[in-house]
Image (cartoon, grey):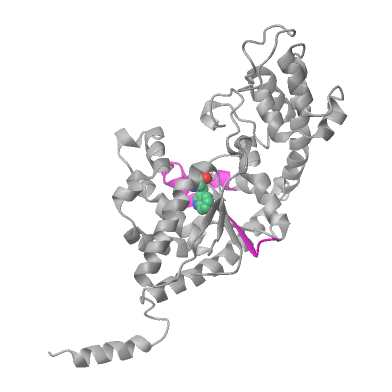
Amino acid sequence: METNRKIILTGDRPTGRLHLGHYVGSLKRRVELQNSGEYDDINILIADDQALTDNADNPGKIRDNIVNVVLDYLSVGIDPDKSTICIQSQLPALHSLTFYYMNMVTTARVSRNPTVKSEIQMRGFADEGLPVGFFCYPISQAADITAFDATVVPVGEDQLPMIEQTREIVEKFNKTYGDALVLPKAMIPENETQRRLPGVDGKAKMSKSLGNCIYLSDAPKTVKKQVNGKMFTDPQHLKIEDPGHIEGNVVFTYLDALCTNDHFAEYLPDYSCLDEMKEHYKRGGLGDGVCKKFLIAVLEETLAPIREQRAKWASNIGDVYDILVDGTKRAREKTEATLARVQNAMRIDYFADRKIINDWDSMLKETDL
Ligand code: TRP
């Protein structure tokens, strides 16, 4: 279906607090998109049903983390007046759409989805047995996206197979039942650093189980400990005079993602910009201690206002609840409208009007009994 509106839908699984990787890779961008004024409608879905597909034995964890994720959203500047924040499980139209879309895709196709494949391995489902619900989450994600008529889906790179799968479902549906669904496009972070901020150990992306995260809600001393105690630099840079390497040096990766020239003016006036600092490090004569101290200052400057906002919202948790109720109510209207359109396209909207009585009537009369 063609639309001239610009609509965003994006979401997160509420399985933990959000960290710096989320901030650099998506949250910062969402706030920019929200404030750009270029979009007609912006929706952020807390995907609690999707989170349950691999946490079925622990719904309490999802329940607790819904509030953590919303607090993280609000504290980075997601504005509930501009963006609709809603909870997936409270939008029954999404469940209905998922059920219809299941007929638009084969098990072979879902099995080929690279993100699903690697998650099956990571979760141990390959040995223990694969829950049908988990296997179907890409289909439910297609329901999320299409229910809002999203034209743009800002996501991390790992989500590209989901958007691809959604597009195929949309094309199949529109071909089978008529043009009722909007074809969405993925929007991924612009540069490599945003796409993949490594954990403090430099090994992989930030992940709770690896203990290599810096959370948006971490206290200053925790941030300091992660940087000073765990952050990977250059193992060959033993003495300050030794030439150092920038590649794979997490301190510089984080500075690439976060620091500005103003930070230098304020905290490290020996250099005017990051390139100058890097040159000195490569030449030799710049120690890791100085670099880490600067990074901690930059991190604090980024995180302090977020932390402050979070504390403010956390002490008014009733307001946060109301934001969710209100956002979810608005989302319910949008998604029910799409479901009605879908059922109409499939001609299964039996009770939309009484016309089916006439159809049945003439069909029965034409039938030779
Ligand atoms: N699968 C996404 C993740 O793990 C979360 C998600 C659920 C999502 N529904 C969505 C993302 C719809 C974008 C659009 O991060």
Foreground pick, 168 / 68: 168
Q: Quadrant of residue 349?
A: bottom left
Which residue is painted at 62% across and 61% down in the image?
Answer: 327
Q: Can residue 23 be seen?
A: yes
Q: Is residue 156 left or right of residue 314?
A: left
Q: Quadrant of residue 37?
A: bottom right
Location of residue 249 in the rendering, given as x and y in whole percent from the top left corner: 64, 21
Which residue is painted at 65% across and 50% down in the image?
Answer: 30
Query: How many tags in the picture?
Result: 0
Location of residue 100 in the rendering, given as x and y in whole percent from the top left corner: 36, 64
Which residue is painted at 36% across and 71% down in the image?
Answer: 177
* The stretch drawn in magenta includes residue 58: yes
Farthest residue toward the left?
369
Q: On screen, 302 above or below 30?
A: above
* The stretch drawn in magenta includes residue 56: yes
Location of residue 337 in the rendering, given as x and y in whole percent from the top left corner: 51, 72
Quadrant location of the C terminus?
bottom left
Location of residue 193 in the rendering, given as x and y in whole percent from the top left corner: 62, 34
Q: Is residue 310 left or right of residue 186?
A: right
Tell me where the magenta segment starts and ends, as one range. Answer: 38-66
Q: Can residue 47 be seen?
A: no
Q: On screen, 288 above or below 327?
A: above
Foreground pick, 311 / 242: 242
Foreground pick, 146 / 275: 275
Which residue is painted at 56% across and 44% down in the image?
Answer: 64
